[in-house]
Amino acid sequence: MSIFELDVRDLAANRDVKGLIDALNYEKADIRSTVADALPEIGTDAQIALPALIEALKDGDENVRNHVAEAIHTIAGQISVPSLIEALKDDESWIRQMAACTLGVLGPNAKAALYALIESLKDEDTSVRKRALEAIKKID
């Protein structure tokens, strides 16, 4: 077991979703698989990782894609649109971006978030505004 694997466990134990999202790009496939397995264990906070997991479905390693698909399935079953709406107000812009992107992934199932996404078009961060607009187009 590498030191990085221990770090993945630490990231999961600390509920560091951003760190785990970053680790999805690690060079070793077994680490990427471990990250995919760790994300669903975090619970509903991991839902902001869905866009990164969906991107990871393109991974060149079949085993990683399998773990990622399982993670998406598990996390999707836990999705809470109200908690994503709340995440659109987070202090961290990357969380607001991921929340908007995840709402877009949900498409019409996230219709209840339209007002909050429209409000996000006024966000100080241009990336949040861009993600909110993309989400609105996918929902409406």
Image: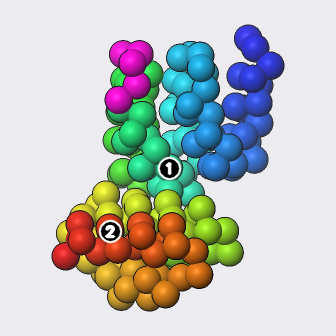
Local SS, label 1 = helix
Q: Quadrant of residue 119?
A: bottom left
For the point 42% across and 50% down, the residue is 51
Which mark identifies residue 135?
2
Task: Pinpoint residue 38: horizontal percent, then vertical percent.
Answer: 58, 35
Main SS category, magenta section: loop
Q: In this rendering, would 103 be left or right of 12? A: left
Which mark identifies residue 98?
none
- Quarter of the image with the N terminus is top right
| In this view, 128 is above or below 121 | above
Which residue in the rendered view is the most extreme toward the front? 126
The residue singled out by tag 1 in the image is 49
Highlighted range, magenta: 58-62
Residue 8 is at least partly visible in this image: yes
Task: Pinpoint residue 129: horizontal percent, then vertical percent.
Answer: 46, 75
- Badge 2 or badge 1: first in the primary sequence: 1
Task: Pinpoint residue 71: horizontal percent, then vertical percent.
Answer: 43, 37
Q: Nearer the viewer, mark 2 or mark 1?
A: 2
| In this view, 83 is above or below 106 | below
- Disc 2 residue type? Ala
Q: In this rendering, would 77 be left or right of 27? A: left
Q: Badge 1, how many Cα within 10 Å: few under 14, some, many 20+? A: many
| In this view, 84 is above or below 4 | below
Q: Which one is nearer the viewer's eye here, 104 or 15?
A: 104
Local SS, label 2 = helix
Q: Is residue 61 magenta?
A: yes
Task: Pinpoint residue 95: horizontal percent, then vertical percent.
Answer: 58, 64
Q: In this rendering, would 19 be left or right of 25? A: right
